[in-house]
Every structure is written in structure tokens, then in C-alpha cells.
Amino acid sequence: TAVLRDIFPHAKILGIDSSANMIRKAKETHSGLDFAVCSAEDLTGSYDLLFSNACLQWIPHHETLIPQLMEKLTEHGVLAVQMPMNFNEPLFRIIREVSSESDWNFENVCFEKNDTLSPEEYFDILSSCSSSFEVWETVYYHALPSHEHLIEWVRGTRLRPYLDVLDDEQKVAFERKILSGLKEAISASPPHETHRPPSRRLHGNGFPPGQR
């Protein structure tokens, strides 16, 4: 939101999140910007730009969500989205495997969805609800010095929902189990023993029907 303010200094910009805690932190950090507790599904009004950076993967039913967002664009508006697509990468596969074990009692916890469709499915969705669109992927390789840094890399994102419901002792055990799996599955790259986990990102933008 702050970056958009720098790019469009005279625009009316609203940042939304369904988490009251996230909105509180945003207001504290950026007191001059407007924020509101609101889900993407409940957003009202019309907008010249709807921009989502690594957010929509937390929201289910993209088959209906994306067309709904397209309907909220003005005549010359644009929907711009970026989402991580790391479901099949070793780090995230190991997290899924460890979290599925009965030791943690996660079966009684309702976690938010954190997943995406295939690029082909987003192509089909956008082709059905926009006048023109683009979909593309980017892969970033991050140089991390140790397996422990891989854990740190995702502690505030992919691991956060699990860690939030574990006590301190369980958190240590949970991360230790993931770390063990990482050391078996992901080797370091010589000569500096660095790790280069790929981070795949799906990008897409779409323009409303009728726009040329």
C-alpha cells in the first residue's frame, strides 16, 4: 500500500485485510494511509486498480473470486495479482508432510487455505471475464547459508498458522522435525555451502470486458 502511494501520490488508496491485527499494525506503521478490515469477497465500490501482492492464495474459490474482483473495476481499470506457487517445492512438501502427522493434533484445527490453481486454470478464468489479460511465471533463486535459514525464511508465512497454535516446546519440536527432513532432501551447493530454494511466483493482470 505504501509503495502504491509513492507511485500514485494523488490517488485515493485503501488497503484491506481480513485480520484486525494486521490492519492495526498497518495503521501504526503507515499512519497517513487508509486501511480497513475487509475481505476481498466483501469489497464494495469501483476501482481503477485492484492490486494484490502475495495475498489471494489465502482466499479460496478463485474460480468465482477473480470474476467478482473484475466486476469491481472501473471502465478503464486493471486487476493486478501476484501469488507464490511453491506447493511442489521440497521445502513446502516437507512442511505438509510433517504437519499431517498426528503428533501435533492439527486435525482439529481449521487452517486458512494457502494454495493456488494451475497457471492454465488462471488463463481460463481470466479469458472468461476480461477483455484482455496476461499470465506469466517468475522463478527466484535465493542464496541462503544454511538449512536453518530455510526455516527462518518461511517462519512468518507458511509456518505461521501452525506455530500460532503450538506451545513453545511444540514449536521447537515441529521446526526440528522439518529441519531434519530438509537436511535429507535438500543438499547445499558448493563451494560456499549455500542453499538456493526456488521461489515461484505467478503474475497476472486483467482488464474488464469492454475495455480496448
Image: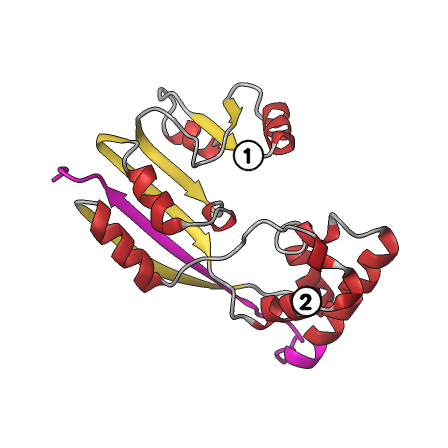
In front: 58, or 83? Answer: 58
Q: Is residue 30 magenta?
A: no
Q: Does 84 sit left or right of 156 as displayed?
A: left
In front: 141, or 154? Answer: 154
Binning the other alpha carbons within 10 Å of mark 1 as few (below 14), some (14 to 19) or many (20 upward) gives some
Q: Does 167 sit left or right of 55 as displayed?
A: right
Q: Is residue 184 magenta?
A: yes
Q: CA distance from mark 2 to mark 1?
A: 26 Å
Binning the other alpha carbons within 10 Å of mark 2 as few (below 14), some (14 to 19) or many (20 upward) gives few
Residue 206 is situated, as x and y percent measured from the top left of the image, at 26, 45
Q: How many marks?
A: 2
Stretch of the chain drawn in magenta: 183-212
Residue 53 is situated, as x and y percent measured from the top left of the image, at 45, 44
Q: Does 96 sit left or right of 4 as displayed?
A: right
- Res. 41 image quadrant: top left
Q: Is residue 60 above or below residue 24?
A: below
Instruction: Name the amino acid, label 1.
Output: Ser
* Residue 146 seen in the current view: no
The numbered disc on residue 18 is: 1
The numbered disc on residue 100 is: 2
Q: Is residue 184 above or below residue 78?
A: below
